Image: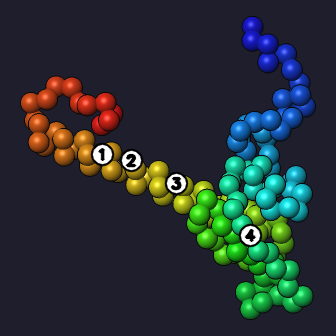
Amino acid sequence: MLQYQSLSNAALSNGHGTSAHETGANLSTLTGNPYTDLARLGLDLHGCRIRYRRTPNKNGETVTGTFNISGTGYTMGAATYTQLIERICAKWREKQAYHRQCRAEKRLRNSQSFIARHPDATVLPAYLS
């Protein structure tokens, strides 16, 4: 029996994991500091600027912000800070899914190109698998 199975859930969720999935971080535990909040969710925030507006803008947003996450700029607005962080995370996950799909399509194109050039090959190179 593995030793970690005897620990309680509270002992396992001490925040020492390397990703949001391992630490159990969620949006209900936001601190108000975007650097720590996004780091808990697995995003590498390099810079940000958050503005709290007195009155909502034409889109009904009272909190707006620009974020530099891993060198990519994002501009978002929301009614609350929690919704702003949710939107940033959703946009980042959407971009990661797009990159994942592009890499998979490239692997497929590369393997089809290799098979077209070497139709008699019985074993594909490791970088195509």
Image position, residue 39 (x, y; %): 75, 52
According to the picture, the residue beneath numbered tag 1 turns out to be: 108
Q: Mark 4 and mark 2: span between their CA atoms?
A: 32 Å
Disc 2 target residue:
104
Q: Are marks 1 and 2 in contact (CB under 8 Å)?
A: yes
SS label for mark 2: helix
In the rendered structure, which amino acid carries the disc numbered 3?
A: Ala
Picture coordinates of residue 51 (x, y %)? 82, 79
Work out whether residue 41 can be spotted.
Answer: yes
Which amino acid, mark 1? Leu
Residue at coordinates 11% horizontally, 42% vertically from top-left?
A: 117
Q: How many angstroms separate mark 2 from mark 3 (CA)?
A: 11 Å
Q: What numbered label is drawn on residue 125?
A: none
Question: Which of pointers 4 and 2 lies earlier in the amino acid sequence?
Answer: 4
Q: Which numbered disc, 4 or 2, marks the residue closer to the eye?
A: 4
Q: Is residue 66 left or right of residue 119?
A: right
Residue that badge 3 annotates: 97
| Residue 112 placement (x, y as % from top left) | 21, 44
